[in-house]
Image (tube, helix red, strand yellow):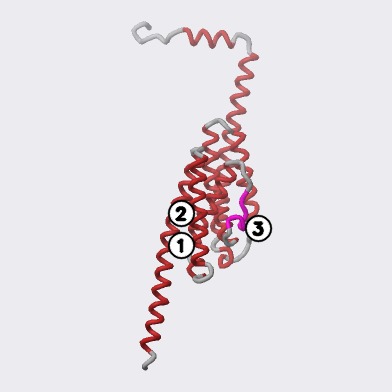
């Protein structure tokens, strides 16, 4: 039993190093998630410089996670909290690129596992729905249609990834959510476009009807009467 204490001490040192790496990874993952959220908020506000600053910080944190964990502690690198943070980085990078009319980043561009990238790609559909609704409120239906096209393209790829959840890390559930978001957005956009068409048709008809213009002008000039005047 003379070797027991040295063995135990060696194990303690290993556990101490692993615990330190885990605590550091948790802090990096939280910071990475925060910068990704700030980048998405900035792109929705059309604050390009702020968006890029947060994306740059997010990239540094993602690189640090990979360098600190991927080789020495692969189990920590592929742990849920690490991959969730990297998924947020994929979502932010994809959303910002598509909203800003930039090329879609690939998994190798972000240097992350394919299943993490696909889950981030699926979640970007929700952010593009938000952008679509903003564009509709600004009467920019052309931009809303462009984003809906991206959403449709992404979903068309997601449904082809018919593999077990153990391989895709729960992508099937994300795809089902994306389907619901896509259909609601398509309905909202269709309703808005039909409303625009109806307004144009009414406007064109009113211009063709004789006397419509003067009647409108007269109605605007005559002030409403109060109850006493009646």
Q: For the residue labelled by badge 1, is the local secondary structure a helix, a strand or a loop?
A: helix
Which badge, 1 or 2, comes first in the chain's sequence? 2
Q: Which residue is mark 1?
A: 81
Q: Residue at x 62, y 34 (%)?
A: 142
Q: Which residue in the rendered view is the most extreme toward the bottom?
A: 1
**Which quarter of the rendering shows the C terminus?**
top left
State whether residue 153 appears in this view.
yes
Query: Viewer-nearest of labels 3 and 1?
Result: 1
Query: Which circle's residue, 3 or 2, is located before the other in the chain?
Result: 2
Q: Callout 3 environment at 10 Å: few (<14), some (14 to 19), or many (20+)?
A: few
**For this rendering, which residue is in front, 211 or 113?**
113
- Residue 24: numbered disc: none
Residue drawn at point x = 49 percent, y = 59 percent: 84
- Split into 4 quadrants, where in the image is the N terminus? bottom left
Estimate the x, y position of residue 116 in percent, counting from the top left: 55, 60
As measured in the structure, the alpha-carbon distance from the residue carrying label 3 to the one carrying label 2 is 28 Å
Marks 1/2: CA distance?
A: 10 Å
Q: Which residue is mark 3?
A: 160
Q: Which residues are magenta?
A: 104-110
The residue that mark 2 highlights is: 33
Please tell me whether mark 2 sits on a helix, a strand or a loop. Answer: helix
Q: Nearer the viewer, residue 23 or 193?
A: 23
- Residue 91 image position (x, y, % from top left): 54, 51
Image: 193 above or below 167: above
Instruction: Please give left or right for residue 177 compared with residue 223 in the image.
Output: right
């Amino acid at each position: 039993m003379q070797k027991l204490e040295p063995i135990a001490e060696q194990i303690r040192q290993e556990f101490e190093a692993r615990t330190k790496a885990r605590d550091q990874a948790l802090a990096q993952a939280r910071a990475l998630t925060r910068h990704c959220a700030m980048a998405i908020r900035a792109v929705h506000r059309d604050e390009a410089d702020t968006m890029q600053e947060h994306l740059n910080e997010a990239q540094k944190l993602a690189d640090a996670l990979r360098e600190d964990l991927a080789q020495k502690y692969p189990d920590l690198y592929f742990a849920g909290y690490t991959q969730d943070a990297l998924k947020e980085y994929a979502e932010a990078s994809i959303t910002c690129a598509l909203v800003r009319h930039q090329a879609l980043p690939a998994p190798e561009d972000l240097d992350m596992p394919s299943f993490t990238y696909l889950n981030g790609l699926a979640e970007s559909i929700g952010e593009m729905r938000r952008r679509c609704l903003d564009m509709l409120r600004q009467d920019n239906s052309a931009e809303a249609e462009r984003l809906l096209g991206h959403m449709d393209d992404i979903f068309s790829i997601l449904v082809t990834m018919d593999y077990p959840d153990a391989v895709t890390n729960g992508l099937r559930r994300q795809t089902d959510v994306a389907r619901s978001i896509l259909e609601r957005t398509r309905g909202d956009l269709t309703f808005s476009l039909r409303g625009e068409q109806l307004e144009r048709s009414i406007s064109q008809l009113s211009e063709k009807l004789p006397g419509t213009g003067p009647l409108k002008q007269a109605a605007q000039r005559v002030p409403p009467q109060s109850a006493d005047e009646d």
